[in-house]
Image: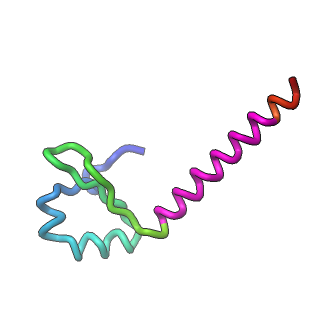
Amino acid sequence: MGISKNDAVSLAQVRARFSELIQEVKAGAEKIITKDGDPYVALIDAERLEHYRRLTRERIHLLLINEAGKGLSM
């Protein structure tokens, strides 16, 4: 998934529009904060962050199960 122009926000804009950006993020947007024109950090909803972390843990578990299955079939 790439970064769209609407998702990129400069650090200066964040300082000026923080409350507005938070409302956009709570409404489902994800914002990529840029520094010197380059992606720097992301602003996402805390629930979505937890969802991403849960997906990562599940993926790791699936990879471990797959590797264990390969080991058992040898």
Which quadrant holds residue 23?
bottom left
Q: Main secondary structure of the magenta part?
A: helix
Residue 50 vs residue 71, the one in the foreground: 71
In the picture, measured across the screen, residue 30 lies left or right of residue 38, that is right
Residue with the most extreme top position = 74
Residue 43, x across and y down, in percent: 33, 61
Residue 37, x across and y down, in percent: 16, 44
Residue at 41% in and 68% down: 45
Residue 60, x across and y down, in percent: 64, 45
Membership of 63 in magenta stretch: yes
Membership of 16 in magenta stretch: no
Which quadrant holds residue 66?
top right
Residue at 43% in and 69% down: 46
In the picture, measured across the screen, residue 22 lies left or right of residue 13, that is right
Q: Quadrant of the N terminus?
A: top left
Q: Quadrant of the C terminus?
A: top right
Q: Is residue 6 above or below residue 65?
A: below
Residue at 21% in and 71% down: 18
Residue 15 vs residue 24, the one in the foreground: 15
Q: Look at the image and give the residue range highlighted in magenta.
A: 48-68
